[in-house]
Each structure stands twice: as C-alpha cells, then as structure tokens.
Amino acid sequence: TPWTCYNDCMNGKRISRNIKSSAQLFWKRSGGFIIGILLITLITYLAFTLNIFYVQSLEIESLEAEVLTYVDREEIEDSLVDFIGMRLFQLDTSSVESKLSEDFTFIKESFVSKRVPNSLSIKIVERVPTLNLTKGKISYLLDDEGLVLGLCTDYESYCDKVPIVTVSNYVGEIEVGEIPFIIEVDEVIELAESEKELGLDIQEFLIPEDTVISVYFEDSTRAIFSVDKDISEQINEYSYTRENLLLKNDPFKEIDMRFDRPVIRVDKYTYWMPE
C-alpha cells in the first residue's frame, strides 16, 4: 500500500542517516589515529625499501674533552668503512661499538647513535697512558686501570712521559689489551695519581718483591710502601713525615712506610724513627 511504501522509505532514510552519522562520528574520533598509522606505515616502507637513509658519514668526537688525543679520526673511519652504505635503520649500533673496542686499545668506551638522514654519531672515551711497565727488556704502556695499551716500541712518545714501573719477580704473561695479574699495579697507579700530594715528580717505581713498592723521586730520595697496608693512609703519613723533615732540615735518603711508624734512612747505615 502507499502507506507501507511511505514507512519503508522513511525507515530507509533513517537508517541511511544513522549510518552516515555513525561513520562521521567514527571518523571524527578515530580518523586522526588512522591517518597517523597510515603515515607511519608509509614512512616505514620508504625507509626500508627505497634508496634512502643509508649511512654516508661518521661524526667522530670525544665525549669528555675538546679533541681526541690518543686515537686518530682517519684510522677510526678506516676501521668502520664496512658500515658505510648500510641502511641506517637496519644497522646495529652495538656492532659498531664492538668493532671499535676490538680495533683500538686506546678506546675505553664508545657511544654510537643514528643521525637521520644518513650519519652515525660516535662519541669516544679514551684510555689515558699512565705507566711504563718494564719486565726484562720489554716495556709496555699501561692506562689508569692497569690495562696494557701496547708495546713501548710502538708508543715511545707516550712511554717517555709516564713513570717507569720495573717488575723483577713477575713470571706471568703480559698481553696487549689485558690487565696483567700484578697485585701491586693498583697501588702503583694510586701513587702515580697522588704525585702532587707526595711532593715530588716520580722518576720510577720498582717492585722488588711481592707487596713491596719502591718509589724513586727526582731529588734522588726514595719511599717504600706496602700493599698490605692502606695505601692512602701511607701516602698521607709519608707526606706529613717528609714535610716535617724538610722543616727541621733533617737529611734523609729514604722513608720506609712498611712498619707501624715511618723508618728514616739517612745513609747506608743510619736508620731512625721520628717521634
């Protein structure tokens, strides 16, 4: 009937309006999210499939200082040449850091990050030459953690600027890139870092026997320390004793810190303990 047809038409229009209204509401609420997902998908597709976002340059700098001192930028670039041309978003930065650690003993840490569109940022923490460790006829360059940086024949300019440590009783192997098992090395490093507190430039360290460290100063005096006692306390007591001797104009050749009180040697035969 005409009335039934009229009702059906009205219901159809109402349903159509409801669908349209629901679609508009859905788009209003979720349209931005959908567009965002589509854009991310498109960008991801472009990044991984098209000929863009390749590593083309390396930005190399020191993390802690203004310039790199012990490693050369060109050598680092040569070491990382295989990473040039790799897709930026597919590259594993930890593999770059591992490569640097393997190739350069002077690199203590490296922090690699990606820079869009086409570069890697490499920030480097260098190891600092601290000691010249001599065993027999071979000398090694050590850093402030006791790690062997290399042979002094390869790094003469660095070895000449740091104190010598002579070990006479160590029978183990000394390998580049490793820390030799010499128990006195940590204390030697602390003594080297306390040079100003000790009051004189250090010329040489000698480890004549286990747990004993002899320190030779530029004025030809000597100090003897024990690894069996707290080295910081020995440094403080040595400095105090030395200053008192200088104030009183008392001559001395050696101050031995291995005992309960410092033992002073004036010459080959004369020893005494300050009150």
Image (cartoon, helix red, strand yellow):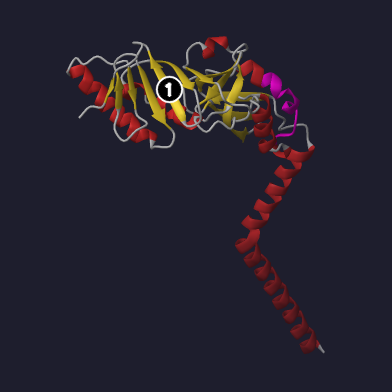
Q: Give the quarter of the image for residue 106.
A: top right
Residue at 47% across, 16% down: 162
Image-based side of 45 in relation to 74, left or right:
right
Q: Nearer the viewer, residue 254 or 215?
A: 254
Q: Give the quarter of the image for residue 236.
A: top left
- The question of residue 221 being in magenta is answered with no
Farthest residue to the left: give it.
248
Farthest residue to the front: give it.
269
Q: Where does label 1 land, which residue?
A: 214
Label 1 environment density (alpha carbons within 10 Å; few <14, some 14–19, many ≥20): many
Report x, y in % for residue 180.
Answer: 59, 30
Quadrant containing the N terminus is: bottom right
Report x, y in % for residue 95.
Answer: 70, 35
Which stretch appears magenta?
A: 77-88
User: The disc labelled 1 sits on which kind of residue?
Assistant: Ser
Farthest residue to the right: give it.
1
Q: Nearer the viewer, residue 42 or 82?
A: 82
Classify mark 1: helix, strand or loop: strand
Report x, y in % for residue 227.
Answer: 44, 34
Q: Nearer the viewer, residue 28 or 218?
A: 218
